[in-house]
Image (tube, rainbow, N blue to C red):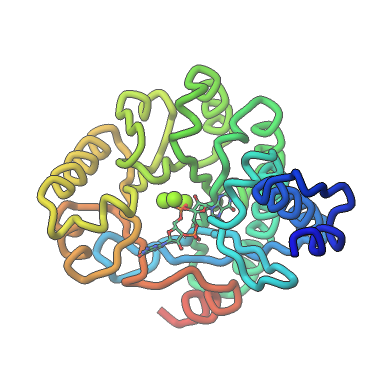
């Protein structure tokens, strides 16, 4: 079966090749085609004010419209794209699409422009990619002012010194930065100050048991307090219930995001639901 499939996709398949290697080769070939054909679509998940009453921004989340397998979530291809380095091109395509949506939404007569945030792989935090990112963002004042970048700490910590230098450059270029998934990995508060971050996003794993688990609640409370004392905005991710919302509100969390409010939506639906409504 594999051999037959292999004939369709890859010429140099040999029976000795492990199933894993085979799958990787197929995926890499498909990802390259996807980049070439721009099969990536950007969905938007609203981010709400800490009170939970009004929208204050949205996060752009990539999906792959695979020609045979349908709509794929990032978990199915981002880790692999990071391994192969293809992530650079995907992230730049996403950023370009988001800038297009931002322009369109700005041109529509809506009450106000909402800030959008884009996830960027830690692999971009090097001299060359930071230069490219700033060039893209600085093509218009609109993009520079209304698009922020989200980074996860895991990768950044490995190259801490270089990271500090590169994030400083982004900051100088006027780009807002958020630390994503905070509270689950290394979570060094010491680095936050050096990393010139504006926003901290509390990991959804920590938010999940925040109502039932007093330890998780204490950690969240400490993150919010310390974050505030460092002048950071705090966003809680993965808010699914009213109880979680109430608790985070009591802890004075600045912004909330999660299925309790809404999922990530295709641009047209996001637009109809959040940008066209008269508020
Ligand atoms: P993230 O940046 O932490 O994004 C939040 C993820 O949690 C999204 O998953 C979102 O759909 C999901 N989520 C939101 N609210 C809830 C909730 O209440 N409950 C639960 N269980 N989940 C919720 P998604 O879209 O599958 O993205 C997964 C991860 O993939 C993202 O995590 C981000 O790290 C990465 N990613 C997404 N888009 C991009 C991109 O364009 N570039 C890069 N480099 N990474 C991306
Ligand atoms: Mg994110
Ligand atoms: Mg996150
Ligand atoms: Mg995540």
* Residue drawn where x is 30% and y is 29% of the image: 189
User: Where is residue 260 shown, x and y percent of the image?
Assistant: 31, 71
In terms of depth relative to the viewer, which is nearer, 225 or 64? 64
User: Where is residue 49 shown, x and y percent of the image?
Assistant: 32, 62
Query: Where 224 falls versus 173 (above or below)?
Result: below
Could one spot residue 139 in this view of the protein?
A: no
* Residue drawn where x is 53% and y is 29% of the image: 167
Q: Residue furthest front?
A: 15
Q: Quadrant of residue 126?
A: top right
Q: Residue furthest left?
A: 214
In the figure, is residue 234 to the left or right of 163?
A: left
Could one spot residue 156 in this view of the protein?
A: yes
In the figure, is residue 257 to the left or right of 71?
A: left
In terms of depth relative to the viewer, which is nearer, 15 or 85? 15
Q: Quadrant of residue 103?
A: bottom right
Query: Quarter of the image containing the N terminus?
Result: bottom right
User: Where is residue 53 shown, x and y percent of the image?
Assistant: 29, 71
* Residue drawn where x is 46% and y is 40% of the image: 152
In the figure, is residue 72 to the left or right of 213?
A: right
User: Where is residue 230 shown, x and y percent of the image?
Assistant: 28, 32
Q: Residue furthest right?
A: 11
Total count of labels: 0
* Residue drawn where x is 62% and y is 35% of the image: 124
In the figure, is residue 126 to the left or right of 146?
A: right
In terms of depth relative to the viewer, which is nearer, 269 or 186? 186
Q: Quadrant of residue 123?
A: top right
């Amino acid at each position: 079966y594999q051999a037959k499939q292999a004939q369709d996709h890859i010429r140099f398949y040999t029976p000795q090749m492990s199933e894993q290697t085979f799958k990787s080769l197929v995926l890499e070939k498909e990802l390259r085609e996807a980049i070439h054909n721009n099969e990536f679509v950007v969905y938007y998940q609203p981010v709400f004010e800490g009170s939970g009453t009004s929208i204050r921004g949205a996060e752009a989340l990539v999906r792959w419209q695979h020609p045979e397998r349908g709509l794929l979530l990032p978990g199915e291809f981002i880790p692999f794209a990071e391994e192969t380095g293809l992530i650079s091109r995907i992230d730049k395509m996403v950023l370009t699409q988001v800038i297009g949506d931002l322009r369109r939404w700005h041109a529509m007569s809506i009450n106000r422009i909402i800030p959008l945030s884009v996830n960027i792989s830690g692999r971009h935090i090097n001299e060359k990619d930071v230069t490219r990112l700033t060039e893209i963002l600085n093509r218009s004042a609109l993009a520079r002012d209304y698009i922020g970048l989200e980074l996860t700490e895991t990768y950044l910590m490995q190259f801490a010194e270089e990271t500090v230098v590169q994030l400083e450059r982004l900051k100088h270029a006027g780009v807002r930065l958020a630390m994503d998934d905070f509270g689950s990995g290394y979570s060094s508060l010491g680095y936050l100050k050096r990393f010139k971050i504006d926003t901290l996003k509390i990991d959804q794993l920590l938010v999940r048991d925040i109502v039932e688990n007093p330890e998780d609640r204490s950690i969240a409370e400490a993150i919010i307090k310390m974050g505030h004392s460092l002048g950071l905005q705090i966003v809680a991710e993965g808010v699914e219930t009213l109880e979680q919302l109430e608790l985070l509100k009591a802890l004075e969390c600045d912004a909330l995001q999660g299925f309790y409010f809404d999922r990530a939506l295709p641009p047209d639906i996001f637009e109809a639901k959040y940008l066209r409504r008269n508020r």
